[in-house]
Image (cartoon, rainbow, N blue to C red):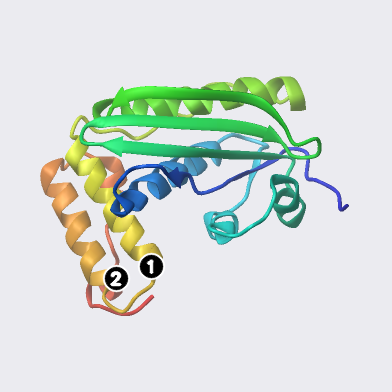
Amino acid sequence: MGSYGESSIAVLPFVNMSDDAGNEYFSDGIAEELLNLLARIPRLRVISQSSSFSFKGKDFTIPQIAERLNVGFVLEGSVRKSGKQLRITAQLIEARSDTHLWSQTYDRTLDDVFAIQDEISAAIVDALKGQLKLEIGAVPKAAGTANAEAHDTVLRGRYLVAQRKPRSPVLAAAEFEKAVLLDPGFALATRNWPSPSCSAGVAM
């Protein structure tokens, strides 16, 4: 067994537990946003999305994934979305022993999605403080919007970009443009605005 990076974590793609398989963009998006939040914590090494999401749909155990990514901790979870109702389950696992350090289920509405992300990141920070003796100040907060449709549209756009299909950039650009129109002040939507090459339809 190889060594595990102690102050390090991988966020795996969350499992889509919705009745609609088309909601996978949403479960992937929640995991990605949590990854981005954790990446803002000083002295915590967070594995890139491309690396951690590469295990999606593959038959690997948590210790096997952790060894390949050289991380000490793994965050995994699931999302069930039905209309405006949302259930997010998240669990933090210590990789070496394959034991749960923390787990929680959140039953909320889509309007509360950013609050849930903030609660999850805060709980993870608390768990890691005890394990790693990290001196962490203020926990990063999610870049939110009061417009649930704008957030949903951004997640669709990011999912399309990740598909890397010929028309993905054009379709994603339309989603990001819609999100900015829905909420011009939504920082997440603005950050995801495609470059001119993307909107020109260049395959990624």
> Looking at the picture, does residue 31 appear above or below residue 115?
below
> Looking at the picture, does residue 72 appear above or below residue 179?
above
Considering every residue shown, the one lying at the far left of the view is 181
Circle 1 residues within 10 Å: few <14, some 14–19, many ≥20: few
Q: Mark 2: which amino acid?
A: Ser
Q: Residue at x 27, y 49 (%)?
A: 154
Image-quadrant location for residue 86: top left
Is residue 166 in view from this perspective?
A: yes
Q: Residue at x 68, y 28 (%)?
A: 100
Q: Mark 1: which amino acid?
A: Gln
Q: Which element type, helix, strand or loop, lies under badge 2?
A: helix
- For label 2, the residue is 168
Is the Cβ of the residue at disc 1 closer than 8 Å to that at disc 2?
yes
Image-quadrant location for residue 111: top left
Q: Residue at x 48, y 43 (%)?
A: 36
Viewer-closest of 17 and 5: 17
Considering every residue shown, the one lying at the far front of the view is 19
Viewer-closest of 14 and 198: 14
Residue 119, image x and y in percent?
Answer: 46, 22
Residue 53, image x and y in percent?
Answer: 54, 56
Disc on the earlier residue, 1 or 2: 1
Q: Is residue 140 left or right of residue 160?
A: right
Residue 17, image x and y in percent?
Answer: 40, 42
Is residue 133 in view from this perspective?
A: no
Q: Which element type, helix, strand or loop, lies under badge 1?
A: helix
- For label 1, the residue is 163
